Image (cartoon, grey):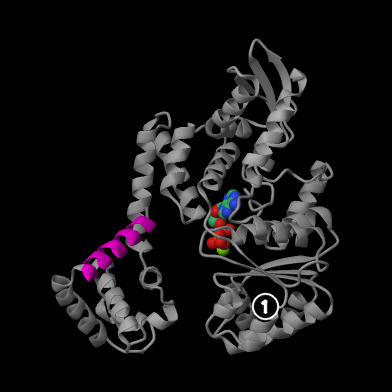
Amino acid sequence: MNKNNLWNNILLLMEKELNPHIFKNYLKDTRQLDINNDKLTVEVSSKFHKEYLNSHLVNKIKSSLSQLLNKDISILFKIAKENKLNVPAVPKEKLKEKTVNEKEINDTKKLSANLNLKFSFENFVVGASNQFAHAACLSVAKSPSKTYNPLFIYSGAGLGKTHLINAIGDRIIETNSHLSVLYIPGDKFINDLIHSLQNGKMDSFRAKYRKIDVLLMDDVQFIAGKPATQEEFFHTFNTLYMNGKQIVLTSDKPPKEIPLLEERLRSRFQSGLLADIAFPDLETREAILYKKCEVEKVKIPPEVINYIAKKIKHSIRDLEGAFVKLVALTTLMNQEINLELAKKAVKDMIKENVKKGTTLDTIQQTVGDYYGIDKKQLCSKRRIREILIPRQVAMYIAREITNASTTEIGRSFGSKDHSTAIHAIEKIRNLRKMDNNLNASIEKIIKDLRMENM
Ligand code: ADP
Ligand code: MG
């Protein structure tokens, strides 16, 4: 085998074996520099890549190498001198170099479009969970109004919707600076509307929202259940759409599940592309932490990154929270970042989470999942046993593990007062004493709920 091509052979093997996004993000842009005395030197584009390769992939690569050559080879990753690619996940698209002046002008434009300058594609980490939404956003940013219109992104809290929708605006201003962009959260739209109505300023309200080229509305679910706002937004949407303007919306649920959303809006929201963001996998969570280290210029050992990423699974906002806490702790204690401090930071986070994290909503979801019925049925008034027992179990668990009152529990299941909940809790408490299966089910569900907050 030609030794100069050794690394290319490894890349071919790795491409077959690895998850495509990992390959693309961490290996594709590497190259062989040297091979000498059984030591292979490979050039990588940043410190981030180097750390990732050393902590995650090096063993796999070494074992492929030793199979290929029948001997052990050590690998050294070296950061490229001209470090243009310090972006972990998205190789930065070639953007024209901006002069200082141009940058200032663009930043001013972004601020007046209401954008958050921190949220760009450059610092968004792509993984399997958000790949589709990311690609859709990138494509809209590249050719506004020409691909998906409207683009509708949805996910649970803290998974990157606000980041992505801002990134679209950011990229459009960078590359298509003649277009006018406006970012607005749903609740701000409502306030703006009320304010304009009260002050007789509807003309300027309409001019503001109907004359832009790109409307980015975050958390559109807030307008549901508000007739005047929905009416106004319906006309805003139509005017923009008919004039070939780009609309991007985000929400915590897909259109068909947003309660109290007018039908005509629902059908419009569904008429373009829907993209959801799922919970990030472990690799993505680690990559996000490495990215934070790079941006904040702090060094965190791989085992600490791994620990935090393993413990915090369901929200990138919480992942960032743990990171901030850890950095604060180290500064406070004037100590190097280590596993012990990380454990403390994560423990504090989890404590906060258990208090506020296990909501009645999560309990309904988890119990529903366990018994294989959907939440709607679980919270309905149907009294067949297959639904009634799970409903009563959910109320019982809610009482056991949250601070919610019986009235709150009753209401969350659609009852007027606390009597249904009290009855359910009593009944399950008694049944539990006699029914081992039920007992085991309840324990399992509670355990799952606790795990969710870890
Ligand atoms: P959402 O709007 O879905 O509640 P956000 O967009 O506000 O979530 O994300 C929460 C935090 O997590 C933000 O600080 C955001 O920058 C960060 N974040 C989310 N997804 C990513 C990602 N893929 N890469 C980097 N940071 C992310
Ligand atoms: Mg948000």
67 in relation to 233, above or below:
above
Q: Is residue 342 visible?
A: yes
Q: Nearer the viewer, residue 309 or 107?
A: 309
Q: Amino acid at mark 1?
A: Phe
Whether residue 87 appears in this view of the structure is no
Chief SS of the magenta region: helix
- Residue pictured at 70% horizontal, 81% vertical: 268
Apparent side of residue 259 relative to residue 246 in the rendered image (left or right): left
Q: Is residue 399 left or right of residue 231?
A: left
User: Would you place residue 124 above or below residue 236 in this image?
Assistant: above
**Percent x, y for residue 322?**
44, 46
Q: Secondary structure at mark 1?
A: helix
Q: Is residue 427 left or right of residue 234?
A: left
Span highlighted in magenta in the image: 437-452
Q: Residue at x 58, y 61 (%)?
A: 277
Question: Could you tell whether 106 is left or right of 14 in the image?
Answer: right
Q: Please tell me in which quadrant of the rendered image residue 136 appears.
A: bottom right
Residue 205 pos. (x, y %): 72, 79
Residue 444: within the magenta?
A: yes
Give residue 371's quadrant in the image.
Answer: bottom left
Image location (x, y in percent) of residue 42: 68, 24
Which residue position is annotated with label 1? 269
Residue count near mark 1 (Cα–Cα under 10 Å), binned few <14, some 14–19, many ≥20: many
